[in-house]
Image (cartoon, rainbow, N blue to C red):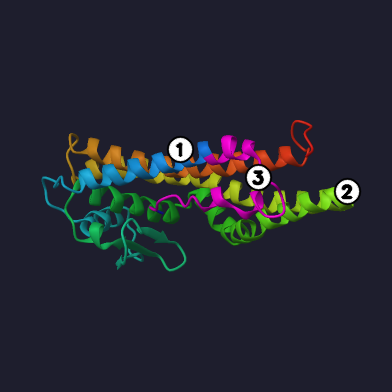
Amino acid sequence: MFTLFNISVLSSPIAMMGMHFDPMYFLLVIVPGMALSGGAAWLLKSRFAKYSQVPSQKGYTGQQAAQMLLDRAGITDVKVVRVDGSLTDHYNPTTKSLALSTPVFDQTSIAAIGVATHEAGHAIQHATGYFPLKWRSLLVPATGIGSKFGTYTMMGGLMLMAIAGPIGKIVFIIGACLYGLLLLFQLVTLPVEFNASNRAKQLVVEAGIVSEQERDGIDKVLGAAAMTYVAAFFTTLLTLLYFLHRAGLLGGNRR
């Protein structure tokens, strides 16, 4: 999946609803989280914009490059389709569709080829039974529950701990476990994304889509994309650690 990191976790209501504002949350979670996510998003956008202006020497479009890698891998049941938006490119293992945004599907730039072949890398992972991809797919439903209800349950637990003691602690732990599913999903996502990029970097040269010299631009675009996933993981980790500390389950603090 080739998307920008969503930083909504940084403005989670858990930090503000029912509790006074804590400067430590601002200093230890919001500031580093925004620096990580904002920096990664800026780097990706700037590199994608830069290498979108660099045409490939052989003139393959993103769609053609992705299809070439699928053909070389003997994958005949995956369709390369167009999707609206920018940097909305993704591979759907359920429908076996490789969706490329218009700036990628039709363009012959180094950036377009990098993004398209990265998504083809996911299709190859699926076809070859790459284990971390299976894990990530299994975690998707649980992650939705964790991201939607984990923060609110932790918030409720912290509030109850002040008036109901052990019951509040149990509620908080349940919320922390739910929120932890999001962290686990992001952790499993890291090898999935890095592996897809590494496959793309190697195969685009082997397939003759780009030259060894042109691969440097693809490396930079895909490297920037990988950093958005790293930023997402560390921001979620910082948030979870902070609230574990607030609950007295980490470092012995209880506020």
**Cα–Cα gap, marks 2 and 3:** 22 Å
Q: CA distance from mark 3 to mark 1?
A: 20 Å
Which label sits in the foreground, 2 or 3? Answer: 3
Residue 19 sits inside the magenta stretch: yes
Residue 10 vs 140, above or below: the answer is: above
Residue 232 appears in the figure: yes
Residue 55 is situated, as x and y percent measured from the top left of the image, at 13, 47
Is the residue 114 above or below the residue 143 in the image? above
Q: Secondary structure at mark 2?
A: loop
Q: Which residues are magenta?
A: 2-30
Q: Locate residue 137: give its quadrant.
A: bottom right
Asked if the magenta segment contains residue 9, the reply would be: yes
According to the picture, the residue beneath numbered tag 1 turns out to be 35
In the image, taking residue 156 as reference, residue 202 lies left or right, namely left
- Of residue 109 and residue 77, the one placed in the foreground of this image is 109
Q: Amino acid at mark 2?
A: Gly
Q: Nearer the viewer, residue 26 or 154?
A: 26
Q: Residue at x 16, y 47 (%)?
A: 53
Residue 15 in the image: above or below residue 100? above
Q: Can residue 203 be seen in this snapshot?
A: no
- Residue that mark 2 sits on: 165
* Disc nearer the start of the sequence (1/2): 1
**What label sits on residue 21 in the rendered view?**
3
Q: Amino acid at mark 1?
A: Ala
